[in-house]
Every structure is written in structure tokens, then in C-alpha cells.
Amino acid sequence: MLIRQVRPFNTASGEVPSRAVDLRLRDGVITELAPGLSPVDGEDVLEAEGAIAIPGLWDQHVHTGQLAQAHARLDTSGAGSVGVILELVRSELAARRETAVAPAQALIGFGHRLVDFAVQPTVPALDEATGAVPTVLIGGDAHHAWLNSAALRALDMPARDGIVAEEDWFAVVPRLTVLPGVAESFATGAAMLQRQALQRGVVGLVDMEWGRPWETWPQRGPRMRIRTAVYPEELAAAPGPTGTVLDARGLVTMGPLKVIVDGALGSHSAYTRDAYTDGHGYAGRGVLSVGPEALREALTQAKAQGLTAAVHAIGDAAAQVALEAIAAVGIPARIEHAQMLTDDDIDAMAALGVTASVQPAHLLDDRDATDVVWPGHGAQAFRLRDLRDAGVPLALGSDAPVAPLDPWLAMAAAVHRSADERPGWHPSQQLQPREALAASTDGITSLQVGGVGDVVLLEDSPFADVPLGADGLMVDSAAREAAQRLRETEVLETFVAGEPSLGL
């Protein structure tokens, strides 16, 4: 493939060449990058007409099984009470009866947040609204679900009165496909999520799904790069060290060991050094799901198998536990979320070479909740600038379906840190657009001969630096405009391993 007249963007310098060049892709790599290249016999030619060329984008944290089912789920996001959710459920079931949907087909919902509820969900209340229809309402942070009795029975779970949370819930997730209609929606959704990701310039995902995704992805006809994680309970079944190729095209590879040390803010389970409260009478320090000894054991086994580690830690106390274990074992690692950090945590990450795998779009949802739940601790949240300045590698993602699989939204959130008319939240932590891009390309800062043939074409560059004010911070109006440009970016074509994906 010969791509004529492109302007390669350098994420490190922010430079766009004034003169366009031609780019040749062969056998999955960039083989030439120079002006005036001539096509060879049988070579496809694309006239890019001065388009901006950037390295392919990655989403470093996705739950593809959950995302694949999202298109068929009831949206419960924004529901501020148990009563509102029950009304949504009743309306959905009534609509199904009118459209002759099979009565036994499971109802799966997603999106609500426990932190918004004054009254907690109960199984009897959901039973009254749903009857015999198996119903699973998953929290927007994916750390709990509200199941009715029919779903509990279908999943061979004991009866209970309240929600299923944390490790108990994670053990259930891979078995949701036994519920009526879920497997069919998954098959459709897996193709949809790849197409939608490629349309946004995403060439690769790190799949943090539960179960054994390394067994299913090679059978799905992958169109993009996939790194599959493994959880401690499946560690012995991992097919090889991190980087092991798992499909014929070399698109699916083994990723890291994933360990979830604590919960999430929306479920009152992020593990923190200081107690927090949510205004509804809850006070505590969250949940430590995996203790220091168990974490060290899992990391030690992973290291022996040649795996890297990805340790989920949202609260600052969880980050401390994770970093101490990583240091003790000496394993290459990432902190997933890295949402609440102290100065000592950042210093330790820099010293250990630990990557911060952060999902900036979460700050748009957690801004107000953080200030309520952890009063006075908002300055610890999403410290992107401090991490970058300390030399900690940044890897941005979405945690989809918790947030949309959209790297442009993630970059926009990193730049402006606001989802409404308010100024950016803790603006000292903002990134420049090109810095956000550099954290979204899997470590590739520029297109170079010999580099992987993952290329994205854009009509214009939305990566110009935002000017700083007299206080040394970004001018808020300019940061807002820069974030808007990122969100509105249109991808012309996405190349994966040298092959076009969108048919430009």
C-alpha cells in the first residue's frame, strides 16, 4: 500500500511538516517515508491529499465482553434512585411485550451508581418489578450488579437480599452468557465494537475481560490488535508469557496478569488511606479485595511465567499496597486507574518504572462524587501532569463500557478536565493535546521506517498547544476549545498492520 501526500505528526515535538511525503506499507510495517515515491506493480495507492498521519491509537483498558453486550442493555445511567431504576425496568418489559420479544429473554442493564442512592437496592424489590424474567442490572463502575431471584437461580447463585459486589460479582461475569439471549447479543456486539473502534482510529485494545479471552479472540476474526489479560484464578491456564502471539495474523497477543486490589468510588469500595463519607451515612475506607501477601504471591507466579502485571488500584491506600508488592517482586507493571495518588505514590511509580494506566473520562463522572466522598482530597485525583512531569509513563484508556471506547473523549478530558460549563477541575493537572496523544499511541511517538504499519489519517491536526496564562496554567477558554476540537475529530482512515479498515 502506497499512501501519497501525508503530513506525519510527531507527538514528541508537536511538529507537522510543511511539505507532504509519501508513505509505503508492506508486510505490516512502514518500509519507506519520503517525497515522490512511485507505485510498484500490483500496489494499491491511496491519495491522502495532505492528510495528517498519526500513529495508531490504543485503548489500554477495555472489558470487551461487557462492551460487546452494551448495545442490547438497558441504560440505567443517570438514574438517581432505586425507584427510578424500577420504573425503567417496568417500562422496558412493557415495551418488550408490545414487540413480542421472547418473554424469557434476560434483561441486562448497565450504568447506575450506588453513590447516587439514598436507599440501597434489594432483590425483593426487583423481583416485584420483573417476575420470572432473569434480570441483571450492572453498576456503571462494573464492580457490582443487582440481580433478581430468577437470574440468581439461572446462574446457580444462592438467594440473597442485596447486590452482588466485587470478587463475588467478578466470578459471575464470565457466566452471563448462559442467560437467555445474552450469547446472541455478544456475538453481534463483538463485531460492532471492532468496527466502531476502528472508526475512531483505534488499532489496538488491552482486553481486561474476565474468563479466557485469549481462547475466544482468535476465533472472532480480529480486525485490530488485541492484548488479552489473565486473572489470578486462570493464571495457570495462560498460554504463554506477555507478548506470545495467539493467532495466525499476529494481531492477538498475551497481555498482563490483571489483579483487582480494591473497588471503585461509585460502589463505596475504593480503598483509601483516610476515611470518606458520601453524605448518606456511609463512612469507611473502602475494600481491600486482595491483601499484600496474596498480591505478592500472584505477582511472583506471573513473573515466573514471563507475564507483566496490571494492578487495579483506585484508592490511594490500594496504590500503596500495589506498589509495595510490585517493588518486592520486581515485576514490570502498570497501575490500572491510578486515580487517587499521594506524592509518595508518584515518586514510587517513577522509581520503579511503573506505568500509570489512566482513564481520563472517569474524572468527568467522578468530579463531583470525589469532592463529596473524599472532601479535601480532590487534588489527589487524576494527577496526569504530576505523573508525566515525574517521568511516569502514561497509558490512556476508557475502561469501556464504563466510559465510551473513544480515545478522543479521553484526550479531551485530559486536556480540559470538565464536562460542563465549569472550568477545568484542578487545572494544574491538565495535559497539552499532543501530550494526551503521546499517551494514546502505545508508546510510539512518530511514524518511522521500520515501525509497525498502524497509521491513522486525519483531515486536520487538533494537537496545537494550548496557551498558558500568567499563572502558568492553561487559559481555560482555550483549553475548552482544544478539548472540543479533539472530541469532534474525524478519522479518514485507519490502517492496521498495513491494511486499510474503513474503505476510504
Image: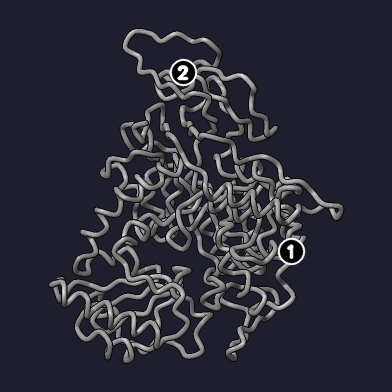
Going from N to C along the chain, the mark reached first, 2 or 1, is 2
Which corner quadrant of the image does residue 25 belong to?
top left
Q: Which mark is residue 342?
A: 1
Q: Quadrant of the C terminus?
A: top left
* Distance (Cα) linking label 2 and label 1: 46 Å
What residue do we see at 30% from left, 80% from top?
Answer: 89
Q: How many numbered circles are shown?
A: 2
Q: Position of residue 379 (x, y in %)?
A: 73, 66
Query: What residue is shown with label 2?
Result: 24
Q: Contact, CB < 8 Å: mark 2 with mark 1?
A: no
Amino acid type of the residue tagged 2 in the rendering: Arg
**Residue 30, above or below 445:** above
Q: Which residue is more in the foreground, 251 or 362?
A: 362
In this view, the residue in front, 394 or 85, is 85
Which scheme is used to colour this image of the protein? one colour
Q: Please provide percent x and percent y for residue 232.
A: 44, 59
Q: Is 454 rendered above or below residue 151?
A: above
Q: Quadrant of the N terminus?
A: top left
- Please provide percent x and percent y for residue 346: 72, 56
Disc ID at residue 125: none
Residue 182 seen in this snapshot: yes
Camera-side residue of 382 and 488: 488
Residue positioned 44% across, 39% down in the render: 203
Task: Give left or right: position of 245 versus 429.
Answer: left
